[in-house]
Image: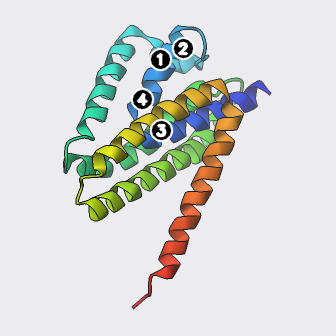
Amino acid sequence: METLLSACLGLGLAAACGFRIFVPFLLVNLAARAGYVPLGADFEWIASTPALITFAAATALEIGAYYIPGLDNVLDFVATPTAIVAGMVVSASVVTGVDPYVKWTLAAIAGGSIAGTVQVATVGVRGASLVGTAGLGNPVVSTGEAVGAVGVTILSMLMPVIAIILIVLTLAVVLRRRARRRQAVPQP
């Protein structure tokens, strides 16, 4: 049961990386320092004071940068591969009690995939906002993404199984709507 909970926590944190890369790391640092989230032996550095300072600064810069028109869209291109790697690392950091091969397979396939899927979905929302509002709606999208990163991270720490169920259901709805829109557009 403990392995299942740590895997759900890892995947929930990976999903949060799809919204904002550094928010989950900052909150995991704080939770690990408080003794709430156990980290794998190779990932104890995440709870260090230098990591706290780095994650706090990176979080502030990342969130702030998404409020700068134009830069937010440029960041999406950089953030997509970075979110995938961050999702893999953060999920591996909290999956405990399993063979390293299993941990890294889960982190690479599931953690990276869920982080990438969430990131791609946010890029789509930001693109629709750019087209639909000439970019004026992007600060609202940025705020939603930041709130999503914090909310998913906290929910994953408090109720990891519920978090995964909600994440999967939400992604299924988003992907289904996207597929329906593509089918509705006439092909040349």
Is disc 2 in contact with disc 3, using a CB cutoff of under 8 Å? Answer: no
- State the CA–CA distance, disc 4 to disc 2: 14 Å
Q: Amino acid at mark 1?
A: Asn
Q: Which residue is mark 2?
A: 32
Is disc 1 in contact with disc 2, using a CB cutoff of under 8 Å? Answer: yes
Q: Which mark is residue 148?
A: 3
Which tag, 2 or 3, sits closer to the chain's start?
A: 2
Q: Furthest residue to the bottom?
A: 188
Judged by depth in the image, the label closer to the viewer, 2 or 3, is 3
Q: Which quarter of the rendering shows the N terminus? A: top right
- State the CA–CA distance, disc 4 to disc 3: 10 Å
Judged by depth in the image, the label closer to the viewer, 4 or 2, is 4
Q: Around disc 4, counting alpha carbons within 10 Å, would you say few (fewer than 14), some (14 to 19), or many (20 or more)? A: many
Q: Nearer the viewer, residue 188 or 145?
A: 145
Q: Vertically, is 141 above or below 57?
A: below
Q: Amino acid at mark 2?
A: Ala
Q: Amino acid at mark 4?
A: Val
